[in-house]
Image: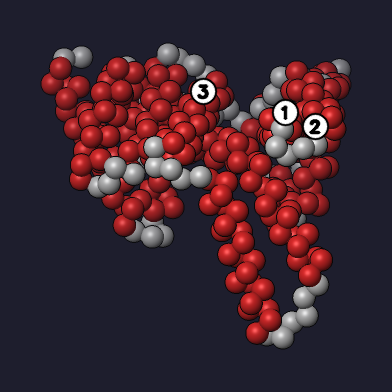
Amino acid sequence: MNQSDIFKDGAVNGLVFLLLMLISIFFPIVNLVAVFLLPVPFVLMTKKHGWKAGVVLFVIIGVICGLLLTYISVPLVLLVAIGGIVIGASIRAGSGPYETWAAGAAGFAVGFGLLFLVTQFVFQINWMDTIHQGIEDSFSTSENFMRTMEVDLDEETLELAKEQAKSLVYLIPTFMMVISIVFALIAQWVSYRWINRTEKTSYRFPKLRYLSFPTSLIWYYLIAIILTWIYTDPSDMLYLAGVNLYSMIGLLLVVQGISFIVFYVHHKKWPKFVPFAVVAGLVLFPFLLLYPLRILGIIDLGFQLRSRLSNNGNQ
């Protein structure tokens, strides 16, 4: 690959990124889609020319965004660049779809960590104080509205709800990880589609029924539960570690449970709408289905249900 091709691809990907960045900043509704596409130019550049080309593209775009847009946009460029470069490098190295997804999620998580540090120490933005203030303002607005409507308020219930809302601040790392996973999934899927179309390849995710996490996940979940039992002080780092580990692994176990349902429906040749109904029910009634799916995921991992069903079906 000669230098002119690298410059050409860098210019195209850079212009696409800047266009997506402008859409993300100035167009309200469309930006919800555009912001998830921001890592794709870095994925494509890195996949084709290597991680060094991806880093050079990041430096150039970072300087342009800092000069033409606002210096506050640079942390966002850093976030999407790290995730995109990691995904692109993983695809270039021939890693499998799930390995690439995991690497990309880790890349975005690192980007979020750096974003947190930059905003905290460079721009003096305290995330926890900002979120706490937002919760206070939201409850105050809701309370005033309900009083104007002459709705009776139970002060004790209101304070309990407020405290529960504030406790979500301690789950910031979990929220970052969940967003990282979603970012990586969308960026990788879009990149696969584009690469398949332009390079006539066949990158794709395996069927969901084949997705299964390592059995060791159960032991990590048990460690997280023990940490939440032992450390109950929110100011304790081990408490924060336990709560976030518990929440994050719990979500992975829910995914494991959904994956098993898809496998079981396929194994029994049931109608395909069943998994969609389960996912729709989870979205609409999360507190009703979250724990049963988590338990199902634990049972699937612990007792290797898929292997048992497959073996029974072959006999």
The tag on residue 153 is none
Q: Is 133 on the left or on the right of 30, as rendered?
A: right
Q: Quadrant of residue 165?
A: bottom right
Q: Secondary structure at mark 2?
A: loop
Task: Report the residue at 27% width, 34% height from top.
Answer: 62
Instruction: Report the mark closest to the observer, 1 or 3.
Output: 1
User: What is the CA distance from the residue labelled 1 to the residue labelled 2?
Assistant: 7 Å
Q: Is residue 165 above or below residue 203?
A: below
Disc 2 to disc 3, C-alpha distance:
31 Å
Which colour scheme appears in the figure? secondary structure
User: Which residue is denoted by mark 1 in the rendering?
Assistant: 238
Asked if residue 256 lies left or right of residue 79, the reply is right
Give the mark, 2 or 3, whose residue is nearer the N terminus.
Answer: 3
Quadrant where the N terminus lies? top left
- Please give the residue where the numbered disc 3 appears in the rendered image: 103
Could you tell which of marks 1 and 2 lies nearer the N-terminus?
2
- Is any atom of residue 214 visible in this view? yes
Q: Where residue 75 appears, x then y in whole percent?
A: 37, 37
Quadrant position of residue 159 = bottom right
Q: Is residue 19 visible?
A: no
49 versus 143 height, above or below? above
The answer to whether residue 304 is left or right of residue 51 is: right
Distance from Cα at disc 1 to Cα at disc 3: 25 Å
Q: Amino acid at mark 2?
A: Tyr
Image location (x, y in percent) of residue 261: 76, 37
Mark 1, Cα crowd under 10 Å, few <14 / some 14-19 / many 20+, is some
Q: Amino acid at mark 1?
A: Leu
Under circle 1, the secondary element is: helix
Which residue has dot 2 on it? 231
The picture places residue 294, in percent across and down from the top left corner, at 79, 37
